[in-house]
Image: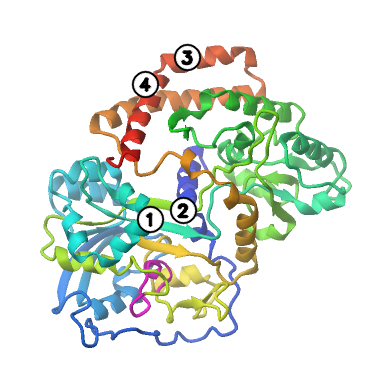
Amino acid sequence: MKRKQFIKIMSLVVAVLLLTTLFVGCKKSEDKGEAKDATTTQGTSGKSPGSEPLVSDKPITLKVMSRRDPMGGPWEQLRIFKDLEEMTNIHFEFDVVYEGYDEKKNLALATGDLPDIFLGGITIEDEETYGPQGVLVELNDLIEKYGKNMKKTFEKYPLLKKTITSSNGKIYTLGQVLSTTTMGSYKPVINSVWLKNLNLKVPETVDELYNVLKEFKEKDPNQNGEADEIPLGEYQFDLLNGMLLPAFGEMAQDIAVRDGKVIFTPTTDGFRYYLQYVNKLYKEKLIDQMFISHSMDEYLAKTKRNIYGLLGHIRQADWQQYQIIHPLTSEYNNERFSSSTDTLYSSGGFAITKVNKYPVESIRWADLFFTELDNGINGITGCALWIGRRGVDWDFTEDKTAVKYLFEPDEGMTEIQTLLKKVTPSQSGFVGELILEVPFESPYLKWVGENNKNYVFPYIRPERIFPAGARFTKEEQERISILKTDITKYVQQERAKFATGENSFDKWDEYIRNLKNMGVDEYIQLYQAAYDRFMKGGN
């Protein structure tokens, strides 16, 4: 797999790490069986008993455009949409594709041949361009009048409202707040079996880690009588950054924030200390000598051979052999912190277009997904487009310490594959309030959640992460696109040379000068302007 493809996949995984791994290998609950009836709080006919209609008092049809999951079945056959139609009186005609969605969406927006609703896939650039033009309907008044659940969610999670608010103060798309016990991009793990075999303690500083890696290299920790161990294994720099950069006082992300000021991490002293440390590991063969050049397939093959002692991520296949480690410290930084997050905010999950004749009904339909898991109607909550209806497809265990499925997966398929084939359209839910405070019923996922609680979440620093909802003006975005290409390429090239010793650190000042000549100071200021607007309440 080429690196560009890997980064695209990793960015998706960073956004919904739990959601793509949650279902694999989940334990089958003893009380699973045929899907049972929903525990309902109101009828299923589109009207609440003794109250006004749930969404529409007459059948209506709306056209929806979206991106289909590669494992997903035909959307018109998915049960969640059939159930929702019965409850809301809204019938959808779907135009969904997996490959070529962006081209299809862009053509629709540009030509005016529009669906009534976009479900997911709308970018910030789309919002900023087609919202003010009127192609995407302004939602502010609709939310105020009909978004009862949305307004409650915005009160609890004000960052969500800021994230979906465009630079002119208007809202053109709905988004999602997502929090689970097992999310987070950076969970470095160490081989606990190797530690036990060599009677070593879990390292807490980079110096202690260096000593452990030396022992891993020299003392046959896998006890096979061969010197085949590779103390630290990784693919490229992405997860390596998350593992080691915080020890030197910096976040893993290139664009980060410190005390309200945007910084470009690759120009910091901490980044230089980090690369010097990686270079030390590289020279002494304590890190895979191929970590920059081997393919993703080659790296994954090595992870299966029990030759790595430290990894930047969890391997579900042999998780019992590993332990998540605390964020490390160093002589340059004595504060433990992680570059992970426990809550993600996104926009672009739901948009109404100018051709939609039923905007009120559309916003009321979307409002159903802004409900807490205990307050849904007929089992419809913020999880509904992800794992289906509570009481039908899933529920909490009796002690409410885990989530269990209420169905058997199809033969040869996992729960998520079965859901995507028959029930739900998405591995992330698209839109709404998705707050899951307990893991799924699986020893592995319970272990991840407990380790997150102890080793990751106490150390997150959300104030140091550049906010996803910060918006750039059209002029700023155009300038950033020009600057970013050369700056990113140069950083990737030079960090590899520093890490492997091809560049002497005597050339560090030259590296900084070159970045300045490429416009890195202007690049930072463009991000600073967007950050300042976001923090002041106007994107």
Residue 167 pos. (x, y %): 24, 40
Task: Give the labeled residue for mark 2.
Answer: 343
Please report the residue visible at 87 percent of the width from the left and 49 percent of the height from the top: 199
Of labels 3 and 2, the one closer to you = 2
- Tag 4, which secondary structure? helix
Q: Is residue 11 visible?
A: yes
Q: Which region of the structure is painted magenta?
A: 376-388
Q: Earlier in the sequence, mark 3 or mark 2?
A: 2
Residue 515 pos. (x, y %): 46, 18
As drawn, 428 above or below 476: below
Alpha carbons under labels 3 and 1: distance apart: 42 Å
Label 3: how many residues lie within 10 Å, few (<14), some (14-19) or many (20+)?
some
Q: Earlier in the sequence, mark 3 or mark 1?
A: 1
Task: Give the labeled residue for mark 1.
Answer: 157
Please report the residue visible at 79 percent of the width from the left and 43 percent of the height from the top: 229
Task: Give the labeled residue for mark 3.
Answer: 514
